[in-house]
Amino acid sequence: FPCIASACMAWRRDAAEQRRGPIVERVCALPGSSRPTGDDWGYEASDPNRASAGGDWVRFETVTEHLTGYCGLAGAPQ
């Protein structure tokens, strides 16, 4: 059988890496408003070239990716 790498049931994944995924929630940032409660909020300007144009508070989904791995049948790399 040909090797199908990470699609195989015997594939072992190395450490995971987390990255910012798509926006899951958006709240209008009115002048003078503060960031919503929680650490996972960021600010997205409506016009990146003019800071005074306003924007939104956005919360992103966290995506976990396993970027590397090895064949579980052949064993861990030495």
Image (cartoon, rainbow, N blue to C red):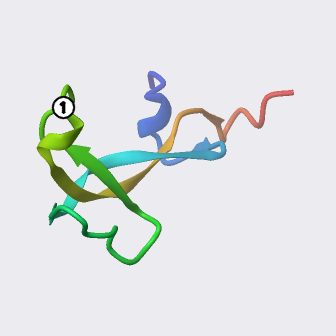
From the top left corner, tell me how far across and down residue 7 is, in percent: 41, 38
Residue at the bottom extreme, as displayed: 37
From the top left corner, tell me how far across and down residue 11 is, in percent: 56, 42
Identify which residue, 67 or 43, lies in the foreground. 43
**Does dot 1 land on a helix, a strand or a loop?**
loop
What residue is rendered at 32% in x and 58% in y? 61
Q: Is residue 69 above or below residue 63?
A: above
Q: Is residue 46 above or below residue 55?
A: above
Where, quadrant-wise, is the N terminus in this rendering? top left
Where, quadrant-wise, is the C terminus in this rendering? top right
Q: Residues within 10 Å of mark 1 (few under 14, many from 20)?
A: few
What residue is rendered at 18% in x and 31% in y? 50
What residue is rendered at 47% in x and 35% in y? 6
Q: Is residue 52 above or below residue 33?
A: above
Left or right, 66 with respect to 76, comes to: left
From the top left corner, tell me how far across and down residue 59 is, in percent: 29, 60
Identify which residue, 64 or 45, lies in the foreground. 45
From the top left corner, tell me how far across and down residue 75 is, in percent: 76, 37
Quadrant of residue 74 within the rendered picture: top right
What residue is rendered at 77% in x and 36% in y? 76
What amino acid type is highlighted by mark number 1? Arg
Q: Is residue 56 above or below residue 51?
A: below
Left or right, 74 with respect to 44, comes to: right
Left or right, 30 with respect to 11, comes to: left
Residue that badge 1 annotates: 50
Residue at the top extreme, as displayed: 2
Identify which residue, 60 or 74, lies in the foreground. 60
Left or right, 72 with respect to 10, comes to: right
Q: How many marks?
A: 1
